[in-house]
Image (cartoon, rainbow, N blue to C red):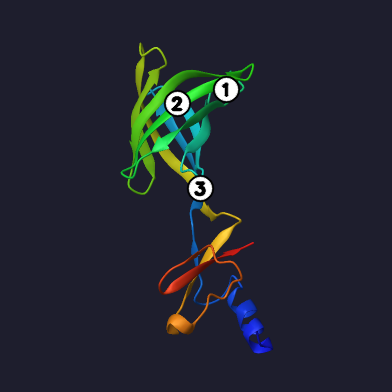
Amino acid sequence: MSLARIFLVLLLALPFHAHAKPEGQALERYFFTGVLDDKYQIQMELRRNPEDGDWQGSYFYQNPNTTGDPIQLSGMVDDEGGFQLSEFVEKDEKRNITGHFSGRFDADRAGASGTWNSADGKRRLPFRLKRVAGYQQRTAERDFRFPLEGGEEETCPCYEPVTSEEKACVCRAQ
């Protein structure tokens, strides 16, 4: 391989290359305030795991008489914004489910509403949430797509591509 070719490969592998487009999932994280049963003020934090798509988080009651200990949440959100989250506490390395949130996010995740159910199904309370903050962050490991415009003779600019497609290859920045 010529020195010019090696330089070209190194140059094309840089993450700021004009033709490289980040691939993969972003970390989504949202913070909400809201009300449960029109009387209990709550705060909730939710984040999506970019690797498996599962959602985790916690919420707590905004009560000046308590410490606001967080209650853990885990569950799934579907493509239409519907969600099922189980709340739980961990004790002696065992997860005890104490209730469930079922609801739907607004289209832009600016808010959500639905029903909280106790674990035994005896209590059902409506809830409403309003997003107060949120962000999306790319994960530390990024994939970059390099269009291959030179036909079959052109090779991928990275040493070990993650995947190779007909008119592009995908390289991973470390």
Q: Which residue lies furthest to the left in this view?
A: 80
- Which residue is found at the position 52% from the left and 34% from the top? 57
Sequence-earlier tag: 2 or 3:
3
Q: How far apart are marks 2 and 3 (CA)?
A: 19 Å
Circle 1 Cα neighbour tier, 10 Å, few/some/many (<14 / 14–19 / ≥20): few
Image x and y of residue 71, in percent: 54, 25
**Residue at image mark 3:** 50
Circle 3 Cα neighbour tier, 10 Å, few/some/many (<14 / 14–19 / ≥20): some
Residue 72 against residue 16 in the figure, above or below? above
- Three-letter amino acid code at the position of disc 2: Ser
**Residue at image mark 1:** 64
Label 1 with label 3: CB-CB less than 8 Å: no
Residue toward you, 160 or 117: 160
Residue toward you, 85 or 41: 85
Q: Give the structural element (helix, strand or loop) at label 2.
A: strand
Image x and y of residue 26, in percent: 50, 53
**Residue at image mark 2:** 86
Left or right: residue 83 compared with residue 146: left
Q: Nearer the viewer, mark 2 or mark 3?
A: 3
Picture quarter with the C terminus: bottom right
- Three-letter amino acid code at the position of disc 3: Pro
Picture quarter with the N terminus: bottom right
Sequence-earlier tag: 1 or 3:
3
Q: Nearer the viewer, mark 1 or mark 2?
A: 2
Q: Distance between the residues labelled 1 and 2?
A: 25 Å
Image x and y of residue 135, in percent: 51, 51
- Three-letter amino acid code at the position of disc 1: Pro
Q: How far apart are marks 1 and 3 (CA)?
A: 35 Å
Label 1 with label 2: CB-CB less than 8 Å: no
Image x and y of residue 28, in percent: 49, 48
